[in-house]
């Protein structure tokens, strides 16, 4: 009985530690899902001279917020139970560059929406979307 209690006492901190990463994994998956949805809505909102600029700014503000949050949601050790490939943590430089490039595309989209420039908004959105695709090919595990 003493051995069981001692094992539980030593393993409890490990379980709590794993749950912390579980929360981060869920947060980053949610952020990616929201980005995916917001990109679709943003694409629909961009409508040449008929663009709803107020709505577009709301979308781009949300996109930049979600994008920024991702930069803190891949801490070392959080790969267990993740759908992401191990290389995010073993070789993080390229992954961080891609996150930064996606964020830059969203920033350009945001500035274009403030300036009501459809062409630049589309370019910013395309830049962010192409980065998403590149990142998925390199870092998303297939089930």
Image (spheres, rainbow, N blue to C red):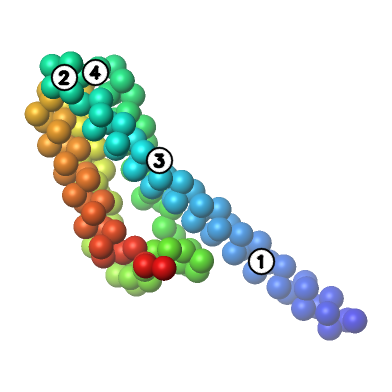
Which SS class for mark 1?
helix
Depth-wise, is mark 1 or mark 4 nearer the camera?
4
In this image, 102 relative to 28: left or right?
Answer: left
How far is mark 1 from mark 4, CA to CA?
47 Å
Q: Residue at x 16, y 26 (%)?
A: 112
Residue 53's label in the rendered image is: 4
Q: Which residue is mark 3?
A: 34
Q: Is residue 111 above or below residue 69?
A: above
In this image, 15 relative to 24: left or right?
Answer: right
Depth-wise, is mark 1 or mark 3 nearer the camera?
3
Q: Earlier in the sequence, mark 4 or mark 2?
A: 4
Q: Is residue 98 above or below residue 121?
A: below
Q: Earlier in the sequence, mark 4 or mark 3?
A: 3
**4 and 2 marks in contact (CB < 8 Å):** yes
Residue 116's label in the rendered image is: 2
How far is mark 4 from mark 2, CA to CA?
7 Å
Q: Earlier in the sequence, mark 1 or mark 2?
A: 1
Which SS class for mark 3?
helix
Which SS class for mark 2?
loop
Q: Earlier in the sequence, mark 1 or mark 3?
A: 1
How far is mark 2 from mark 3, CA to CA?
24 Å
Q: Residue at x 36, y 38 (%)?
A: 37
Query: x and y percent of residue 16 in the render?
Result: 66, 62
């Amino acid at each position: 009985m003493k051995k069981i209690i001692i094992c539980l006492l030593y393993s409890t901190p490990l379980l709590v530690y794993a749950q912390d990463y579980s929360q981060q994994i869920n947060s980053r998956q949610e952020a990616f899902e929201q980005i995916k949805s917001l990109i679709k809505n943003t694409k629909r909102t961009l409508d040449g001279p008929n663009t709803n600029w107020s709505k577009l700014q709301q979308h781009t503000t949300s996109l930049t917020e979600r994008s920024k949050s991702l930069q803190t949601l891949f801490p070392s050790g959080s790969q267990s139970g993740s759908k992401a490939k191990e290389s995010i943590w073993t070789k993080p430089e390229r992954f961080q560059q891609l996150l930064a490039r996606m964020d830059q595309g969203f920033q350009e989209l945001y500035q274009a929406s403030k300036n009501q420039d459809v062409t630049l908004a589309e370019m910013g959105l395309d830049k962010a979307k192409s980065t998403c695709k590149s990142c998925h090919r390199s870092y998303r595990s297939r089930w």
